[in-house]
Image (tube, grey):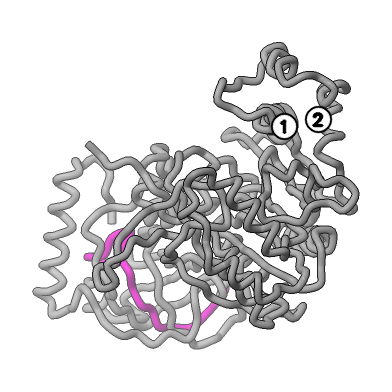
Amino acid sequence: MMEDGVTEQQLLQIRRDKLQALRDQGVNPFGGKYAVTHEPGRLKAAFEDDLPVKLAGRIVAHRDMGKSQFFDIADAQGRIQCFLNPKTMGEDAFEVFKLLDLGDWVGVEGQTFTTKKGEPSVRVSALTVLSKSLRPMPDKFHGLADKEIRYRQRYLDLMSNEASRDVFLKRIGMVSEMRRFLEDRGFLEVETPMLQPVAGGAAAQPFKTHHNALDMPLFMRIAPELFLKRLLVGGFTKVFELNRNFRNEGISRRHNPEFTMLEAYWAYADFETMADLVEEMICHLAEKFCGGLRIEHKNEAGEVTRTINLERPWRRARYHDLIREIDPQWFEHTPEKRRERCGELGVEISPAMEDYEVTQQVFEKLIEEKTFDPCYVTHVPKELVPLAKQNPEDDTVVDVYELIINGQEISPGYSELNDPIVQRARLEAQAGEETQDIDEEFITALEHGMPSAGGIGIGIDRLVMMLTGVENIRDVIFFPHMRKRE
């Protein structure tokens, strides 16, 4: 299996020569069904001696000791050491093994034992070739230094980078646990359309398509909200959906064109009830998958750059009060003065921004991006959230929260607006002259009566980033979108 000191082209040819040699010996290099009794990582985690086993995996390490051969096989769950020699498996099978390389997939049958050095191992009595790899694995010492290759060819990253595999395994576990958490509290998981006639539920640029049979334009959904609320109207009082949303907007370390979102609606609840639910859920995930409520974020050198403290209770603060921490007189200033203050504070704004957007820009740059421990920002201006209920004591704000952790919004939560007359007025104000963008079917549903309700959204990608200490959204998405290679 030695591959040092050869060019890539020579290496590719050597592997193809070995492929032909296997065929010449009557071995199928791309085998079929193989009935396993154990998986490598799980066998090692619950190891016991003298156990007959059949397992399969990729060869990821090899130690040649002449007649004695040690090699590790692995899958995404972990690895285990295997041992073989001609006495245990016969000369013919031993010759087949010599034609294998790092990266090949094999099935092994044998019995477990512990080496003198205390390493859990399998003494191989039979070996089956399952897939001959015609290209080499990434360098085992340096892995994939080129991040672009890691994103474009994620399979190489997963086979060589244990830290990356761990992030994705945690993500998978967290998503499963979130479903279980909600189901245990009586929520029903539902599915709503991803192709929608009107792009609603959020202010974002949609992806457009066309349905030929119906001869009508459709949009990839930017949010499932308006359809989930139709289910509230229909009498489903606790629902959630965990699936993809699509927004035809910029790509950054915190944005991907398609992303995973949890939305949940709870009839008769309000935004504060939903905040309690989210706080309990995220703390539960942190304790189960991260070992506690203090999450360390590290740089590439392994140095801790910040520690996020999730210990409860989480801070709750009104939007206006947070702005006043930046400038106590902000809301007493004239609109012109607020624009002037932005320049003094180093916040970039554009002439086209409305006055409330100027304030929101200050919030995003000077508060949101600098808030790392959890903070529920409540009672935001009604212009920012057209689908939430107005506060009964102050009709300029709505009863919502925006949960900020790690310098970004992780979850919004609303006391949902269920007055169809107010809802129509809000949507018309948001749409301006583009009244065709109003979802009339949604308004009709509200007119049939939607119960009071609390609603939440949780950005799964950003949540996983925060809980695993990852700083780029591409590191928590198996196959992130990339610019096409020239």
Q: Which residues are magenta?
A: 97-116
Q: Element under label 2?
A: helix
On the question of residue 116 being in view, the answer is: no
Q: Which residue is mark 2?
A: 323
Can residue 113 be found in the magenta stretch? yes
* Rendering coords of residue 121 (x, y %): 51, 72
Q: Position of residue 391 (x, y in %)?
A: 84, 51
**Do residues under tags 2 and 1 come within 8 Å of each other at their CB atoms?**
yes
The residue sitting at 32% across, 79% down in the picture is 127
State which tag comes first along the sequence, 2 or 1. Answer: 2
Q: Nearer the viewer, residue 210 or 258?
A: 210
Left or right: 475 with respect to 464?
A: left
Are there few (<14), some (14-19), or many (20+) residues within 10 Å of tag 2? some
Residue ID for mark 1: 363
Q: Which quadrant holds residue 75?
A: bottom left
For image coordinates 86% across by 49% down, the residue present is 314
Q: Quadrant of residue 284?
A: bottom right
Whether residue 480 is situated above or below residue 146 in the rendered picture: below
> In the rendered view, would you say 233 is above or below 66?
below
